Image: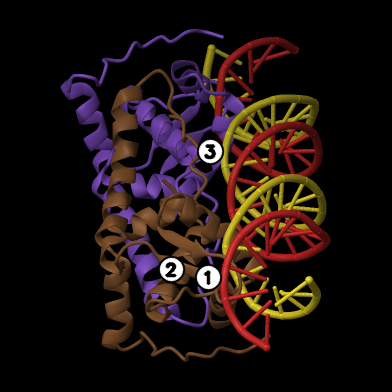
Chain colours: A brown, B purple, C yellow, D red
Amino acid sequence: MNVTSRGRYAVTALLDLSLHGCQQPVPLADVARRQGLSVKYLEQIFCGLKNRGLVESVRGASGGYRLCRAADAISVAEVVAAVEAQKITQDAAGPVHQTLLSEFWSGLSECMRNYLEDATLASLCECARGGQPGCAEQGDEAPRA
Amino acid sequence: MNVTSRGRYAVTALLDLSLHGCQQPVPLADVARRQGLSVKYLEQIFCGLKNRGLVESVRGASGGYRLCRAADAISVAEVVAAVEAQKITQDAAGPVHQTLLSEFWSGLSECMRNYLEDATLASLCECARGGQPGCAEQGDEAPRA
DNA sequence: GCCTTTTCCTACTGAACGAGTCGGAATTTT
DNA sequence: AAAATTCCGACTCGTTCAGTAGGAAAAGGC
């Protein structure tokens, strides 16, 4: 289990989608502009999201992406898993303590997974809207390139 | 927060030290042999452990390494932190949701840290000895190079 | 029917990092 | 003096991360 910036971008992007996509699909160009990311990189990320069935796409003019499920049915864990290249993290321990430690380390992964599964896009949205101080209300338009 | 195989090796090695080092310092060659690791790599790892004050070294013939503290006063978190190159993991999020998400991600680190702080070398030792099925009793001698 | 907007696909690059090796110097015991 | 050990600094090699690039295919609007 590992979370890189690619995974964090994916969450940011889907959060943007949740907040702006009502029924209409949202083009990546919009997400890119609002979040200050590159369209090309987002394409790559959304490819993974689509494969996992988290978003669906509409091609052509006035197309874009839309969530496949309700925002409260999509956990952050799923989003991250969708875009992280899951390399098989082999057990690094000598002959001694092998099983003991490998259980211990997979407990760590479990722990992370739990944290990420408890949060959904909806819960983050709510927090973003609900106005916890610090969760700045978002300007709909961000600095343009 | 990140745990690589270097960190896992460090825990394995210190666990070995806890089990075999009574008062005498334990040479890395022994640890390497028992755990099937390279002495050179262990040297590197123990350098980090020493800097953080987790082990002390005795040079020269019949020298080696010894824990600085009791095994129940050394958490796995410390061990890992000692040998992982802590790269500054910059926040990856657009202007929107910045603070919200950065709190969320640091919550994840917190969660990992808690898990790793709750385990000490002693608790792992105990589990290794205590004979949970699966925690194989360790052969003192391992396949020699 | 053409043009624009969009997703889609397939490479490619550059930098950083992880994992581990290597050679030798310094120190202490035997 | 010789052997065992830690100490130190460099170096290699492969993988992964992050991001770019160029164009092909689909759909809508005029």
Residue drawn 26% across and 33% down?
B124
For the residue marked with disc 2, what is the amino acid? Arg
Q: CA distance from mark 3 to mark 2?
A: 48 Å
Q: Are marks 3 and 2 on the same chain?
A: no
**Disc 3 marks which residue?**
B45
The part of the image, by quadrant, that contains residue A33 is bottom right
Residue under circle 2? Answer: A66
Callout 3: chain:
B
Q: Between marks 1 and 2, how big is the CA–CA gap? A: 7 Å
Residue hosting label 1: A64
Residue A145 image point, x, y percent: 68, 85
Provide residue B81's location: percent of width, then percent of height.
Answer: 44, 51
**Share a chain, discs 3 and 1?**
no
Rendered position, A10 above or below B68:
below
Are the two marked residues, 3 and 1, in contact with CB atoms closer than 8 angstroms? no
Is residue A94 among the parts visible in the rendering? Answer: yes
Local packing at callout 2 (Cα closer than 10 Å; few below 14, some 14-19, many 20+) is many
- Provide the secondary structure element on which disc 2 rests: strand
Residue B53 visible to an observer of this rendering: no
| Nearer mark to the viewer, of 3 and 1 | 1
Quadrant occupied by the N terminus of chain A: top left
Q: Are marks 1 and 2 in contact (CB under 8 Å)?
A: yes
Disc 3 crowd rating (10 Å Cα; few below 14, some 14-19, many 20+) is some
